[in-house]
Amino acid sequence: QTELLAMEILTNDMNAWIDENKSSFVPPVCNKLMWGAGQLKVMFIGGPNIRKDYHIEEGEELFYQVKGDMVLKVMENGKPKDIPIKEGECFMLPAKVPHSPQRYEDTVGLVIERERLKTEEDAIRYYVDDTNTEVLWERWFWCQDLGTQLKPVIEAYFASEEHKSRKPGDNVRKTMPFELNPDPMPPVHVLSQLIANSVDDEAEPPATKKAKTETKPRNLFDGDFVVDLLEGETEITATKETFLWQQAGESVVKGDKEEKALPKGFVGLVQKGHVVSQTEGGKCFVMFVRD
């Protein structure tokens, strides 16, 4: 919690940070958390990492492929479906959807999740076969750090009688803590096209308070994760923990005791009260969790 208590302005050159931590994006680790002390969990994941388990959570996940392609296997209304996510594409996975990321060698992807409420449970689930019609084994838990909690759960599965016999046993809940999402999956977006085609959505509250110009934040997705696009010369004040990704131009983030530049290609994590001033021609993603 040191990051939050200090109200530090956190910034990184995304590609440089990935290169500095490239040893973390290969087996057996495959992932590295950039920021995670607060509500937003910002991580980068590499490969190869081909897996059979499915993850279920009550929040959404944002996927963006920085380098190379991946496939996200999901259960769409009870049926298996593959969602290819190519380099430069992003996908907002809805809440309560069983999913299994399939990552390949020499790839890196950005994933953003939210902090779990203490009343929420995640699950790691295995199915009897590739039709995914019958649950073989699952483990439900309160997720604090999936990176460290995943390994013992997977080890428990491989040591189980269900894994050996391929027959379901007592490790499948009779009653789910929530209903799985029955809705069709949303589309995958090419990030550059998403920026170019973004439109105003007056029905959605902005992530921040507009101060300088008439430029309005853009809402790009529905759901609990709100992703806005700030365009042009504008100044905003963060109302809660907010992830920034400067796509063009430059912004300056100001706090009580410091200020930091956010050039093109940099990412940042700011807290309530931090002021973001963007220059003319700038484009910046702003991401936060809806109240």
Image: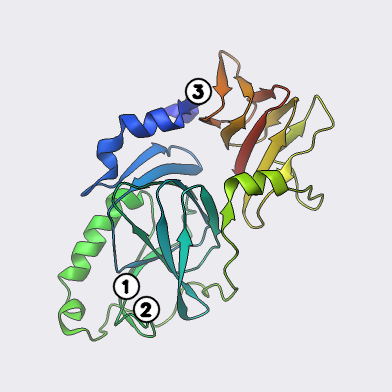
The residue identified by callout 2 is 173
Q: Which residue is drawn at 37% across and 34% down?
A: 18
Q: Residue at x 35, y 52 (%)?
A: 146
> How many C-alpha atoms fall within 10 Å of the one at disc 2: few (<14), some, or many (≥20)?
few
- What amino acid does circle 1 point to? Glu
The image shows residue 43 at horizontal and vertical percentages of 41, 43
Which mark is drawn over residue 8? 3
The image shows residue 124 at horizontal and vertical percentages of 34, 66
Pointer 1 or 2: first along the chain: 1
Q: Do the residues labelled 2 and 3 touch (CB within 8 Å)?
A: no
**Position above or below: 228 against 252:** below
Say which of marks 2 and 3 sits in front.
3
List the single residue furthest toward the right. 214
> How many C-alpha atoms fall within 10 Å of the one at disc 1: few (<14), some, or many (≥20)?
many
The image shows residue 187 at horizontal and vertical percentages of 59, 63
Q: Do the residues labelled 1 and 2 touch (CB within 8 Å)?
A: yes
- What amino acid does circle 2 point to? Arg
**Position above or below: 243 against 252:** below
Along the horizontal axis of the image, is 218 left or right of 34?
Answer: right
Q: What secondary structure is found at the residue carrying circle 3?
A: loop
Along the horizontal axis of the image, is 191 left or right of 124?
Answer: right
The image shows residue 244 at horizontal and vertical percentages of 57, 34
Q: What secondary structure is found at the residue carrying circle 1?
A: strand
The residue identified by callout 1 is 138
Pointer 2 or 3: first along the chain: 3
Which residue is at the front of the view, 197 or 221? 197
Residue 133, image quadrant: bottom left
Q: Which residue is drawn at 31% across and 33% down?
A: 21
Residue 253, image quadrant: top right
Q: Is residue 187 visible?
A: yes
